[in-house]
Image (cartoon, rainbow, N blue to C red):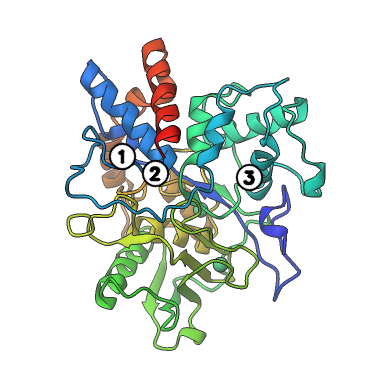
Amino acid sequence: MTACSSAGALLDVSGSGARAFDVSVARAGWFCSGSSSGMRSERRFIIDEEDESAGNLKGRSTLPYPSTELTDDRNNNNTWRGFIKFLDAGRGSHVSGMSELKKYFQRFGYLEQVPESNLTDAFDDRFESYVVDYQKTLGLPVTGKLDSDTVSQIMAPRCGVADSAVRVTGRYAYFYGEPRWARSSPMTLTYALSPEYSIDYIAQSEIESAFDRAFSRWSAVIPVNFTAAEDYWKADIKIGFFSGDHGDGEPFDGVLGVLAHAFSPENGRFHLDAAERWAVDFASEKSRVAVDLESVATHEIGHVLGLAHTPVKEAVMYPSLRPRTKKADLKIDDVKGVQALYGSNPNFKFSSLLQSDTSSSCSCSAVGFGTRSSLWARTAWVMMMLTFVWWW
Ligand SMILES: [Zn+2]
Ligand SMILES: [Zn+2]
């Protein structure tokens, strides 16, 4: 199966029925973690960025979480960590291993499917156009170079659905063909957790509660009800925690990297990487690479309903999510996107969402790394990243 990562073609007809695939990564939430002024907050921000990009850091006293309380996870995936060496590459560059980065772009829908032997280490005009496309799609400054924003985004843990989508610049997007669940409104969709493919370190009731809350966020804004089904095989939406190659052509990759993926309507498959350290409560889960289950569930349900990835960083449907970050509240972009497919829940009022969106997005962009021009900040960031790679 190759369709999941093929550029521009999301339909896969090689398996059991057509399906669409979208991939995403999100570095959600990090923008609001500190003040934008002062040396101390600047340093902290840089470390946050490094932590986000690399997916995990160990034992730094300046980390935003108390390092003495968090546990290291030496089994971390190193999938995209090596991409740091491409920092500052641009047209005309030739860096050993660039072909691996091209495979990454291929996987997430930016580069057409060609034999791997055709992928060279040259940063040519064509590759520059893919980098520009990536930057536009993920709401990054468009430079055409592998600048720090772009490299850190590439390295961030993300959703496995490709970024290819039907989109209007700057907002929510759909899969090709704009598939949706086609039942009369108000509709009810059933969901079930696989009794076989699950995780055992979180109580089943807590896992179920996290999914219940995630589904409720969507049902609050559209006329769609979600109910838990007894029979997994009869459920519309089948959820499971899988490891590695699990038979759908999109193998999971271990800790961080790809966190989860889901299929477009009306497929209903929703898979989470069992290798992640999933969390429902960061107060009790101390792993530095813990990933918030409810946030990822909310994102993947968006795919199940027909939403693709958005370039709006604050939105749930942005493709990346840093470890130990909760980002489950739907934003205006998410709501407008899903309501364009299903209509509005008659009980939903936009005014409340507008209020929360305004208050929560206040200073986010103001402290984003992409808006910084400080040479000090840039130099320090690069040094920190290089230090991390060496130290690892
Ligand atoms: Zn996604
Ligand atoms: Zn899967």
In this view of the protein, which residue sits in the foreground, 285 or 209? 285
Q: How crowded is mark 2: few (under 14 residues within 10 Å), some or many (20 or more)?
A: many
Q: Residue at x 21, y 21 (%)?
A: 40
Residue at mark 3? 104
Disc 3 residue: CB within 8 Å of ligand 1: no
Q: Residue at x 70, y 76 (%)?
A: 16
Q: How crowded is mark 3: few (under 14 residues within 10 Å), some or many (20 or more)?
A: some
Q: Residues within 10 Å of mark 1 (few under 14, many from 20)?
A: some
State the residue lying farthest toward the top.
Answer: 375
Rendered view: 58 above or below 273: above
Query: Is the residue under label 1 in contact with that under label 2 (CB below 8 Å)?
Result: yes
Amino acid of disc 1: Asp
Amino acid of disc 3: Tyr
Q: What element carries label 3?
A: helix
Q: What element carries label 1?
A: helix
Going from N to C along the chain, the mark reached first, 3 or 1, is 3
Q: Position of residue 295 (x, y in %)?
A: 35, 55
Q: Position of residue 24 (x, y in %)?
A: 53, 48
In this view of the protein, which residue sits in the foreground, 100 or 324? 100
In this view of the protein, which residue sits in the foreground, 149 or 266? 149
Q: What element carries label 2?
A: helix
Residue at mark 2? 332
Amino acid of disc 2: Ile
Which quarter of the rendered picture does the C terminus lie within? top left
Q: Which residue is drawn at 44% across and 56% down?
A: 255
